[in-house]
């Protein structure tokens, strides 16, 4: 394991951005024309975010920030990779968008308390050992009643082999692991990023930790990426067997003191 997973992942994503690898490519012009259809297909944001202060957490690369800005929000994009954030700055300048950038870890944000109305968080928590520390930081920077939409790699997907055996996709690592114990390395997978250090978070942490950090869970979805006709071992085949991602809609409670107890409201 690298002595500093944060720095290791910073360098890994810097390199991925330079190579324009998957998840480092900017939004397309046609996507910017109807941005909410791209970022909010389930309508969790209410159909209009004009004038809202939005934090795109761990979201550099010129995709998420410009899409939310095109929808009328005042956007701040956070990432540990300044190479990723440079793309956001270039697009903001070219298209005259109101986008600020913050290069910092997702669990140590140099922003004021209750700064944002909405925090959107694409898949990234797998790169930190403690997801609850991230939740607590989001609870600090979001306003009471604010919306937190996050997406995570599912624990099963992170446990399972990237290759399909005659018995299916077998689990290669235990579910109950030390928080600081990184996952086994992979190569040639679309479900995990080669060269990065990843950590598995249990459902107790992903959902329970979110509730205990001061949020009410209002909805949850598992975006479907499966394809029953896909070749065994492919992205579509594995995604048919194992949900790669979970997406969570959560609301910050009005209370700002010590948070305790689960709060789940599925609508």
Image (cartoon, rainbow, N blue to C red):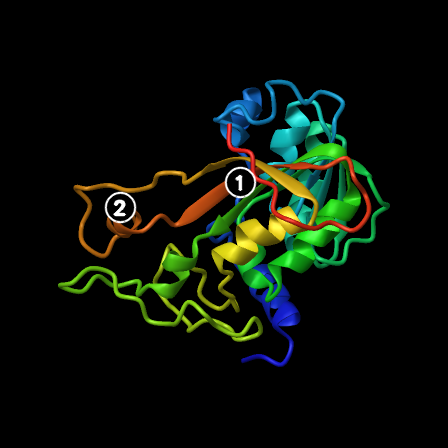
> Most extreme residue toward the front, as rendered?
261
Can you say which quadrant of the picture contains the N terminus?
A: bottom right
SS at badge 2: helix
Task: In the rendered view, tell whether residue 53 sits above or below residue 102.
Answer: above
Question: Residue at point 52% right, 56% down?
Answer: 204
In the displayed structure image, the side of residue 255 where residue 80 appears, left or right: left
Percent x, y of residue 158: 41, 61
Percent x, y of residue 171: 31, 67
Badge 1: residue crowd in 10 Å (few <14, some 14–19, many ≥20)? many
Residue in front for this viewpoint, 76 or 31 = 76
Percent x, y of residue 80: 68, 58
| Snapshot quadrant of residue 249 | top right
| Snapshot quadrant of residue 174 | bottom left
Q: Given this view, does label 2 or label 1 mark the residue nearer the observer?
A: 1
Badge 2: residue crowd in 10 Å (few <14, some 14–19, many ≥20)? some
Residue in front for this viewpoint, 70 or 260 = 260
Which label number is shown at residue 248? 1
Q: Is residue 93 visible?
A: no
Question: Residue at point 31% right, 48% down?
Answer: 239
Question: Residue at point 46% right, 45% down?
Answer: 246
Task: In the rendered view, tell whether residue 3 sits above or below residue 121.
Answer: below
Q: Is residue 232 visible?
A: yes
Distance from label 2 to label 1 (Cα)?
A: 20 Å
| Snapshot quadrant of residue 117 | top right
Which label number is shown at residue 240? 2
Percent x, y of residue 55: 71, 40
């Amino acid at each position: 394991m690298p002595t500093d997973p944060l720095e290791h992942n910073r360098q890994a994503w810097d390199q991925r951005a330079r190579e324009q690898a998957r998840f480092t490519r900017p939004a397309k012009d046609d996507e910017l024309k109807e941005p909410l259809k791209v970022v909010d297909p389930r309508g969790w944001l209410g159909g209009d975010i004009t004038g809202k202060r939005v934090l795109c957490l761990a979201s550099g690369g010129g995709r998420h920030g410009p899409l939310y800005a095109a929808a009328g929000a005042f956007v701040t994009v956070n990432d540990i990779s300044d190479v990723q954030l440079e793309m956001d700055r270039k697009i903001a300048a070219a298209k005259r968008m109101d986008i600020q950038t913050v290069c910092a870890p997702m669990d140590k944000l140099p922003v004021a308390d209750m700064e944002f109305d909405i925090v959107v968080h694409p898949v990234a928590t797998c790169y930190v050992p403690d997801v609850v520390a991230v939740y607590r930081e989001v609870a600090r920077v979001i306003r009471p009643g604010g919306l937190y939409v996050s997406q995570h790699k599912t624990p099963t997907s992170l446990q399972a082999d990237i290759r399909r055996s005659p018995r299916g996709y077998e689990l290669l690592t235990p579910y109950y692991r030390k928080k600081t114990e990184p996952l086994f390395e992979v190569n040639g997978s679309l479900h995990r990023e080669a060269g990065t250090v990843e950590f598995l978070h249990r459902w107790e942490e992903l959902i329970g930790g979110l509730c205990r950090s001061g949020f009410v869970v209002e909805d949850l979805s598992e975006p479907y990426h499966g394809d029953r006709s896909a070749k065994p071992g492919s992205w579509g085949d594995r995604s048919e067997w194992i949900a790669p991602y979970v997406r969570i809609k959560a609301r910050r409670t009005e209370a700002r003191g010590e948070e305790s107890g689960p709060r789940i409201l599925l609508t």
